[in-house]
Amino acid sequence: MSRIGKKPIDIPGGVKVEIKGLRVKVAGPLGQLEMDCHPRIQVRIEEAGAKVLVENDRPAERQNKQLHGTMRALLANMVAGVSKGFEKKMEIYGTGYNVKEQGTKLVFQIGFCHPVELAIPKGMKIKIDAAATRGNDVPARFTLSSIDKRLLGQFAADIRNIRPPEPYKGKGIRYADERVRRKAGKAFASGAA
């Protein structure tokens, strides 16, 4: 059995969970999320209505074990998302690099000959703390927030892939808590012969 899958999910106050067949709907103060569960895994609400239980009929099968923990983690993220929400902080390093929000798009100037535009997904909120970098040491900072952890992670990864941090000067887009391994540049010998 999956150790993660066996743990019950506590339902905080103000969050409502509905199960109809394989469809699970979670509503809370920040919004509403829905998901279809895998047919091999059963989801039920405890009699008291304070916990959600994820059950596995055939714990000996490998795929069922994997799905058990995955479904439980996805449901726990839905409950946490509608009650507290998720956020991811990002930074841009590089002289002259900047970010701005234009309507439903996020526009980056990051060293290309053209600005890079990304459509902001529905339900995503963006807060720009520092729009432009100041030199190579003071980064541009912005925060992404959403109730859907999967959507948040995917959008943050898409942003980072525009220009990942390079190892020599550290220029590029990175997560705020990411540590970039730096390399030493080429060492030139003196020209005295």
Image (tube, rainbow, N blue to C red):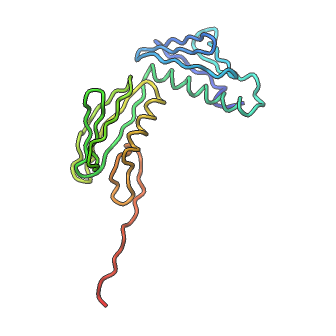
Name above or below for residue 31 compared with residue 74.
above
Q: Would you identify the image quadrant in which residue 31 lies? A: top left
Observer-nearest residue: 36 or 134?
A: 36
* Location of the C terminus (image quadrant): bottom left
So how many labels did they put on this image? 0
Residue sitting at x 62%, y 13% = 45
Name above or below for residue 18 compared with residue 136.
above
Q: Residue furthest bottom?
A: 193
Q: Would you identify the image quadrant in which residue 101 lies? A: top left
Residue sitting at x 30%, y 34% = 106
Name above or below for residue 171 compared with residue 62.
below
Residue sitting at x 53%, y 14% = 25
How far across and how far down the image is residue 11, in percent?
53, 16
How far across and how far down the image is residue 81, in percent?
46, 23
Name above or below for residue 106 compared with residue 15.
below
How far across and how far down the image is residue 172, in percent?
34, 49
* Location of the N terminus (image quadrant): top right
How far across and how far down the image is residue 80, in percent?
48, 23
Judged left or right of residue 54, residue 148 is: left
Residue sitting at x 39%, y 49% = 164
Observer-nearest residue: 154 or 4?
A: 154
Q: Would you identify the image quadrant in which residue 115 lies? A: top left
